[in-house]
Amino acid sequence: PSLSMFPSNPSLCSELWNCLDQLPYPLRYRLYDTWRDGSHVINTNTTNKSTVAATTSKSERSAISSMALRVGIMGVADKPLERIQTEIQTGIEARYVLKRVSKENFRDMGKRLAKAAHSQPLIVFAIVFGQIESYDNLIGLMVDSFKNLTRLSLDTMGYCVLQILGGGGRDGDVIHRDKMKADGINATQWMLSLEQFTGSFWKKFPEVELRGILNFLISRLQAGETAELGVLKSLLSTAGGADSGAGGGSTQLSRVQLEGRAGSQLLKRETSSFGIVDKVNKKTAKKLRDVLLQRDIG
C-alpha cells in the first residue's frame, strides 16, 4: 500500500514486482486486498492538514473531507488521509484521460493512463471498467493502450477482473450485481462487455496470471452456476484461438470448413465463409492449454 504514496515511478514498480513475482498468486491477491481496503490507524494530531490544503484544489479538498468523515477520521479509519488524497487525484486524472481517448490519440492517452496507474492501478482500473461496461467500443482501444503498463499493474488487472466477477476479497467485500437478465438466459450488458474484455486482454497479455480466474470459473461450473460461462468461452475462443469460425459452433461448419481449420493460415482463409480468419496468439494458446492441464485447476 505504501506504493500509493510515491509519485509515478515505473522503476520502483518493477523492483516491487520482482519480489511479488516470487509469491504464489493467492498470496499476491490477498496483498492486493490489503492495498485496496487499507488497514491503518489515523492520528489526527500528526496529520499534516496544511500540506493537504496547499496541494489540492477546492473540489479535491471537499472530496477528501467527505471521504474522511465517511471512514471516521476521529478514530480508526481504513486509509490515511494522505492516501485518500492521492487516490482522488489519480481518479481525477484517469477520468480526464478516458473522456478524451479516441482512435487517433489512444497511444498518447494510453501513456498518461499508464503513468497514473504506476502507483494507483486499482483506482485507475476501477474507473476503466466503469467506462468499458457502458461503452464497449472502447475495449479494443483500452487493451491496446495497456502495453505501457508495468508487470505489477498488469497483474493487478487480473485481480480486478476476478473481483468484478465476485471471486475475490473477504466476505462482504464484493458487491454482487445481476449477471443475467430477467429472462435468466441472456447476460446483462456489463457482463457481455466484461466477457469481451477478458478474452481480448489475455490474448494481448498471456504473461498475466490465468490460474486465479480459471479456478474461479471452473469451480462455478462445478457448482452448477453458468452465469460466467461466457467469460470462459471468451478465454477459450478469443485468447486461446479455439473459435470455430464466423458461423459459431463447429456443428454449423461443413466438413471442408472443419478440416480447413486444422490447416495453415491460407487454408483457413480459403475455407472460411467470408475469408476472414483472426490471428491466433500461439503464446497465449499454449499458456492457456498448460494451465488447464494442471491438476489443481478445477
Image: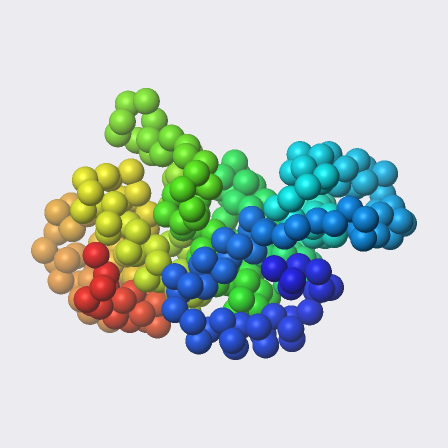
Q: How is the image coloured?
A: rainbow
Query: In this view of the protein, can residue 104 be seen by the observer?
Result: no
Q: Quarter of the image holding residue 120?
A: bottom right
Quarter of the picture containing the C terminus is bottom left
Q: Nearer the viewer, residue 176 or 65?
A: 65
| 7 versus 179 height, above or below | below
Image location (x, y in percent) of residue 29: 44, 59
In the displayed structure image, the side of residue 180 where residue 75 appears, left or right: right
In the displayed structure image, the side of residue 43 where residue 224 appears, left or right: left
Residue found at the very far top of the displayed protein: 182
Image location (x, y in percent) of residue 43: 74, 49
- Residue at 66%, 59% (x, y): give it: 4
Query: In this view of the protein, can residue 131 be seen by the observer?
Result: yes
Q: Nearer the viewer, residue 216 or 53?
A: 53
In the displayed structure image, the side of residue 131 where residue 248 appears, left or right: left
Q: Nearer the viewer, residue 195 or 47?
A: 47
- Residue at 20%, 62% (x, y): give it: 261
